[in-house]
Image (cartoon, rainbow, N blue to C red):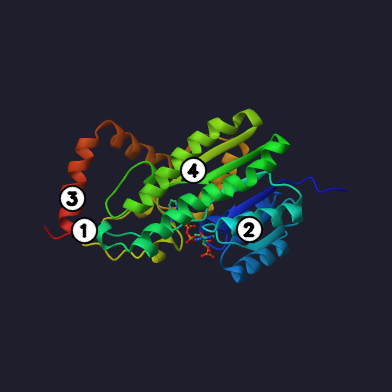
Amino acid sequence: MPNSSPVILITGASSGIGEMTARLFARRGYRVAITARRLERLEQIASEIRADKTGTAGGDAFPIQSDVSDPASVETMVKTVLDHYGQIDLLFNNAGFGRLGWLESLDPARDIQAQLNTNLLGLIYCSRAVLPHMIHRRQGHIINMSSIAGLVGTPTYTIYAASKFGVRGFSQALRREVSIWGVQVSTIFPGGVETEFAEKSGSTKRKTGISTPRWLRLTAEQVAEAVYRLARRPRAIAVVPWMMRYSVWLNNMVPGLVDKIIERRFVKRERGL
Ligand SMILES: NC(=O)c1ccc[n+]([C@@H]2O[C@H](COP(=O)([O-])OP(=O)(O)OC[C@H]3O[C@@H](n4cnc5c(N)ncnc54)[C@H](OP(=O)(O)O)[C@@H]3O)[C@@H](O)[C@H]2O)c1
């Protein structure tokens, strides 16, 4: 009998939010195709998902190595998933990283191009690669990972913000382009999440000590739950935690005041001026 469980393809599933989303969706009955560059970690996660008997269905996971910044690798990856499962119901475009610092100190290739290639172009390549399949089936859902940094620009996050604002624009345009085919596009904008993100970001300890307060920080499991809610009820924009909507509102309503506060309280002090 053909397997009727929905299939989710998750990029950046070898750690953090992607990994937790894979584990959660598998427990809730999805077949999960997980992709990233670190194959060994994907294989380990897939074998743990298969062994996890706590969910509603036997865990079904398929690990595939891919670099989302390489269009050829993405095409092969999507084809491999379709050959294996026969369908993709949901694409979670999650792969990404931040390389933070003053713009003049960022390296053009390692920091600037690599970030845009992964966070923005990678997400575009993956969406483009699954769309013919979704349009053909007249159904499907793409959930794109942005960030609060895709709604509010802050110093040292210039390139990261450019990539995540880009995700927002791309998602809005794509949503309006493909809705006639029954394909949904949602975008999630999390605040600070406790994952490997910070240690990979190259950010040093700040003189001001300013960072997301502990009580406002999310776990990867909480973001995975938010992704699951989106899968059940697609929405153009989902900000998590909901309290973060106030900072977005403030930024939109009184941008000049926000400029001044950030300049005085953060930039001058961090630069020792
Ligand atoms: N943590 C936060 O505070 C936060 C807040 C808002 C949004 N986000 C976003 O959430 C997403 C997941 O980040 P995370 O916090 O879970 O960090 P993470 O644990 O470092 O996960 C990042 C994932 O992306 C994958 N990845 C990176 N470059 C890739 C590439 N070129 N091709 C394929 N996979 C790639 C990594 O796998 P490999 O290294 O194995 O390839 C890893 O699985 C990112 O898009 C990030 O911008 C994070």
**Location of residue 36 by image quarter:** bottom right
Q: Label 4: few (<14), some or many (≥20) within 10 Å?
A: many
Identity of the amino acid at label 2?
Ile
Q: Residue 210 versus residue 164: which sits nearer the camera? A: 164
Instruction: Determine whether, in the image, residue 142 is placed left or right of residue 213.
Output: right
Local secondary structure at mark 1: loop
* For discs 1 and 2, the disc positioned in front in the rendered view: 2
Instruction: Determine whether, in the image, residue 256 is placed left or right of residue 21.
Output: left
- Residues under numbered marks 2 and 3 in contact, where contact means CB atoms less than 8 Å apart: no
Q: Could you tell which of marks 1 and 4 lies nearer the N-terminus? A: 4
Identity of the amino acid at label 4?
Ile
* Residue most extreme to the left: 273
**How many angstroms separate mark 1 from mark 2 (CA)?**
39 Å
Judge whether residue 239 can be spotted in this image. no
Q: Is residue 9 above or below residue 114?
A: above
**Location of residue 23 by image quarter:** bottom right
Residue beneath disc 2? 34
Residue beneath disc 3? 265
**How many angstroms separate mark 1 from mark 3 (CA)?**
8 Å
- Residues under numbered marks 1 and 3 in contact, where contact means CB atoms less than 8 Å apart: yes
Residue drawn where x is 33% and y is 34% of the image:
249
Residue beneath disc 1? 208
**How many angstroms separate mark 2 from mark 3 (CA)?**
42 Å
